[in-house]
Each structure stands twice: as C-alpha cells, then as structure tokens.
Amino acid sequence: MTLFPGSLNVHLATKFDWNDASLEPFKKIYSLIPYGGNRDICLIPCEIYKEEKDKIYGFAWATTNAANDFDYRVLEIITSVRLREVLRLSNGSVVTIDIPVPWKS
C-alpha cells in the first residue's frame, strides 16, 4: 500500500493506550534510524469512516516516546488517500476508527 503524503490527526474523547495488551498482536515497532530518522515508531492497522460503508484501511502511528504519554488523546492516521477529501471532513467532523484490524498484505 502506498501511503499518501499527509495525515489526519483525530482528537479522542478518551485516552488511547498504545501499551494495552490487546493491541500487542497487531502493533509493530519500526526503527527509522536506518532511514535517517532519529526515533522508533509504533504502527497499528485501523479503519476510519463516517459511515460503515465507507471504511478506509490505514494505520494509526506514533513515535515510541509519544506512545508512552500517560494522556495520549490525538491519534494520527495515515492512509493511501486524502481522508479529508474522501470522507468530506472539516474541523470538528466526527469519525469512527476501528482499531485494531488485521494486517493486510
């Protein structure tokens, strides 16, 4: 899957716990250091939508430092499409995020 430049930041009503045991089978940690980055990232597959029929597969991600924040409330979603355009979002739009979902090849 080719990821589209840009992402969507979603403000959550409650804390997202990257270290929840139920996420472990789905969470992958990648080092960006070999690619010129200076940290590791956590990646979890997800689906985001306004209506059930319009689900878009993507990934929630955070740096490992941010994932350990005790009050993590902004989830960054990356996909292969421009989410704001495809889902017709504006600031304050409400979306649903199913997380985790199975990894796709």
Image: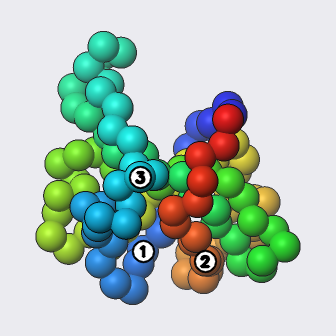
Amino acid at circle 1: His
Disc 3: which residue: 25
For image coordinates 17% across by 58% down, the residue present is: 68
The reply to whether the C-beta atoms of the residues labelled 3 and 1 are less than 8 Å apart is: no
Residue 81, percent from left and from top:
72, 47
Q: Quadrant of the N terminus?
A: top right
**Can residue 61 be seen in this snapshot?**
no
How far apart marks 2 and 1 lie (CA) works out to 11 Å
For image coordinates 35% across by 55% down, the residue present is: 24
**Is 23 on the left or on the right of 55, as rendered?**
left
Amino acid at circle 3: Pro
Label 2 environment density (alpha carbons within 10 Å; few <14, some 14–19, many ≥20): few
Looking at the picture, does residue 38 appear above or below residue 21? above
The reply to whether the C-beta atoms of the residues labelled 2 and 1 are less than 8 Å apart is: no
Residue 11, percent from left and from top:
42, 74
Disc 2: which residue: 96
**Quarter residue 41 falls in:** top left
Ranked by sequence position, the earlier of labels 2 and 1 is: 1
Ranked by sequence position, the earlier of labels 3 and 1 is: 1
Q: Quadrant of the C terminus?
A: top right
Foreground: 59 or 22? 22
Residue 5, percent from left and from top:
59, 37
Residue 89, percent from left and from top:
68, 71
